[in-house]
Image (spheres, rainbow, N blue to C red):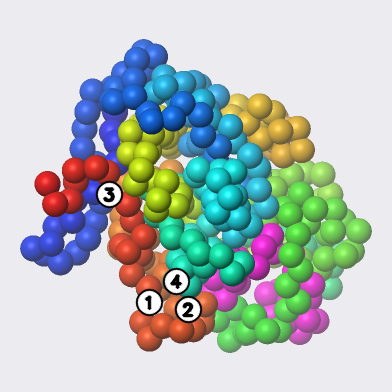
């Protein structure tokens, strides 16, 4: 039996949650729902272990079984990927919640209108999956040293989950984000930046953290999975409201395949390693080596959209002044797209 996302808002108790409804599992190459409106879509994805469910579903042919041909395009972060939604170059993006919430609050990206819908929760952080790395002989020995020396710290893009991760970690030590110099580079480039001394520290999710340890001897300065950010939601699957709502069968087929990939990602580590080493998924630039794939730390890959858990992202953004125009945290429910027929009959 396989599960697909279905939204059920228990309005009588006033707490929105997403539950799963069971349906028959195909797994046999036969689509288990109506044919998609289109047969091919582009998915922009940040090439990290956060997206393991997507890569597994692609490698194992789950999307093809649902009548979809998926092209995965690597991007530096969810924030720049939104331009592809605006132009139609991509139909779905998987990346960090923070960038998507910021764009939705303003309903614009780079001066152009945008309206986003979340169709799936992608990943939640675990110990060792998201961390700050430095070189072993660095003068940076503690988190406080980052602000003491006004360190140059690599973060992949502006306006993303990195600001929340650092903000929470700094707050517990009484520090401020203004005490560091945020340098925006792609995760692979950060590894070279550390090795050459161009960066004092870098935020690296897996597999890039393990790659940095194995290739340049980088060491962990601090793990982000602590305090208020334990098991923090990191990745989400989103699309434009217009495209999502006009292609319900395509979205449903995508989710059925993704659900299978998420289940495998949560239960079969060798499958995750294989998918992250697959150059067809990640391209040669991003694919992990066998040793790195075998030693990296993985996320958890949810099969539900737990709205209270997802709301933690917006709450943290509000706390760290990433929602400055609001008087209370943005309600994540405003962005969630229910499957057809799940609300209002």
Q: Which residues are magenta?
A: 140-168
Mark 1 to mark 4 CA distance (whole Å): 10 Å
Q: Residue at x 74, y 44 (%)?
A: 211
Q: Which is more toward the observer, 31 or 197?
A: 31
Q: Cβ–Cβ below 8 Å for labels 3 and 4?
A: no
Determine whether, in the image, residue 242 is placed left or right of residue 130: left
Give the number of the mark in front: 1 or 4.
Answer: 4
Element at badge 1?
loop
Q: Residue at x 83, y 59 (%)?
A: 194
| Residue 291 magenta | no
Mark 1 to mark 2 CA distance (whole Å): 7 Å
Determine whether, in the image, residue 21 is placed left or right of residue 288: left
Which residue, given by chain and number where applicable, does mark 4 sit on? Answer: 105
Q: Residue at x 37, y 73 (%)?
A: 330
Q: Between disc 1 and disc 4, whose residue precedes?
A: 4
Q: Between disc 4 and disc 2, whose residue precedes?
A: 4
Query: Toward which corner of the image does residue 145 lie, by quadrant?
Result: bottom right
| Residue 160 magenta | yes
Query: Outermost residue, left direction?
Result: 12
Mark yes or no: residue 65 visible.
Answer: yes
- Label 2 crowd bin: few (<14), some (14–19), many (20+), radius 10 Å: many
Element at badge 2?
loop
213 in relation to 111, above or below: above
Which residue, given by chain and number where applicable, does mark 2 sit on? Answer: 323
Element at badge 4?
helix
Mark sitting on residue 338: 3
Q: Position of residue 217 (x, y in %)?
A: 81, 51
Which residue, given by chain and number where applicable, does mark 1 sit on? Answer: 329
Q: Cβ–Cβ below 8 Å for labels 1 and 2?
A: yes
Q: Which is more toward the observer, 36 or 202?
A: 36
Mark 4 to mark 2 CA distance (whole Å): 8 Å
């Amino acid at each position: 039996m396989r599960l697909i996302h279905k939204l059920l808002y228990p309005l009588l108790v006033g707490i929105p949650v997403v539950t799963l409804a069971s349906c028959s599992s195909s797994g046999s190459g036969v689509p288990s729902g109506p044919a998609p409106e289109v047969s091919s879509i582009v998915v922009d994805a940040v090439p990290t272990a956060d997206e393991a469910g997507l890569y597994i579903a692609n490698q194992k042919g789950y999307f093809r079984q649902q009548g979809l041909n998926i092209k995965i395009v690597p991007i530096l972060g969810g924030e720049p990927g939104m331009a592809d939604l605006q132009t139609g170059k991509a139909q779905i993006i998987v990346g960090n919640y923070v960038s998507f919430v910021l764009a939705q609050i303003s309903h614009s990206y780079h001066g152009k209108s945008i309206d986003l819908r979340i169709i799936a929760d992608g990943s939640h952080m675990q110990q060792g999956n998201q961390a700050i790395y430095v070189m072993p002989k660095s003068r940076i020995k503690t988190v406080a040293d980052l602000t003491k020396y006004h360190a140059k710290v690599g973060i992949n893009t502006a306006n993303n989950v990195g600001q929340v991760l650092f903000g929470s970690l700094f707050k517990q030590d009484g520090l401020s984000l203004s005490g560091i110099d945020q340098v925006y580079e792609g995760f692979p480039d950060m590894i070279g930046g550390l090795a050459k001394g161009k960066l004092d520290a870098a935020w690296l999710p897996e597999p890039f953290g393990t790659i940095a340890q194995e290739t340049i001897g980088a060491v962990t300065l601090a793990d982000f999975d602590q305090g208020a950010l334990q098991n923090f939601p990191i990745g989400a699957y989103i699309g434009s409201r217009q495209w999502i709502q006009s292609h319900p069968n395509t979205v449903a087929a995508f989710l059925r395949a993704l659900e299978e990939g998420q289940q495998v990602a949560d239960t079969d580590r060798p499958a995750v390693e294989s998918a992250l080493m697959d150059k067809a998924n990640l391209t040669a630039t991003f694919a992990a080596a066998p040793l790195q794939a075998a030693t990296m730390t993985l996320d958890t890959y949810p099969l539900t959209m737990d709205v209270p858990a997802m709301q933690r992202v917006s709450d943290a953004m509000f706390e760290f002044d990433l929602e400055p125009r609001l008087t209370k945290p943005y309600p994540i429910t405003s962005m969630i797209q229910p499957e057809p027929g799940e609300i209002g009959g």
